[in-house]
Image: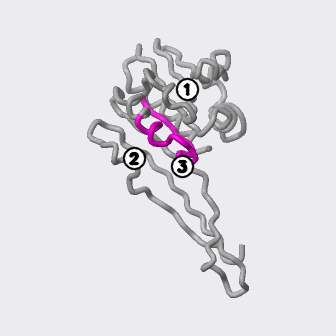
Amino acid sequence: TFSGSAWALLSCAFYALTAKPETTVNVFVIGPSWAHVIETMMFEGDSSIMGVAPEGLINVKACSRNTATGRPTITLHTEGRPGKVTITGLSAETPEKWRGKEGQGAWWDEPAACQYAMSCWQQLRQILRKSEFPKALLTTTPDRLAPSSCSNTNGNVCKVVITIRAVVDLSASASSADFAPPLPTTAWTTPGV
């Protein structure tokens, strides 16, 4: 969550610097449920966007947890820039409600836990289609696997941790087949754990 939160804030800064000053910059954060988006990704905990943001960066008075409108938002201070810079939450439970939204970038946490992952991906591509530099960060929590064939001399099962993170290019040249690009993976075993 920390890496996604930091990426979302840095993306806001990048897009605010590269977009026309009057343009509204919007980076989306997408999670498998509203609870995950609001509590884990945006507002609560040390690794959330609010927890990671430097003091004074976020305009707390302009933030909203409102899911009735489908738009929990975090608004950043943008002195000297007429266009707003916001981070907007979306739930992967209802990708059909994303229609009509536009943004520059997106952080999608736990895409494998989303029931409508392909619909979300298609909607996300539409959301980012007008961005000059469309990017999406996909993050997942490492799973602990315990295959029966992995044990040390004491009979203890090894745990294998696999972490997958990707920044996906959503430019016009990318096709829908790019949903599952080859991703960098890291794997290691810890005997006796």
According to the picture, the residue beneath numbered tag 2 turns out to be 179
Number of the label disc, if any, that sits on residue 27 = none
Front in this rendered view, residue 31 or 46? 31
Specify whether 148 is left or right of 134: right
Q: Position of residue 165 (x, y in %)?
A: 50, 51
Residue 98 to residue 182: above or below: above
Span shown in magenta:
104-122
Q: Residues within 10 Å of mark 2 (few under 14, many from 20)?
A: some
In the image, what residue occupies the spot 57% across and 35% down? 93
Dot in front, 3 or 1: 3
Residue drawn at (60%, 18%), measured in percent from left and top? 69
Q: Which residue position is annotated with label 1?
A: 88
Place of residue 68 in the rendered image (x, y in percent of width and height, measured from the top left)? 64, 19
Q: Is residue 36 visible?
A: yes
Can residue 50 be seen here? The reply is: no
Q: Residue furthest bottom?
A: 153
Proximity of marks 3 and 2: CB atoms separated by less than 8 Å: no
Residue ID for mark 3: 112
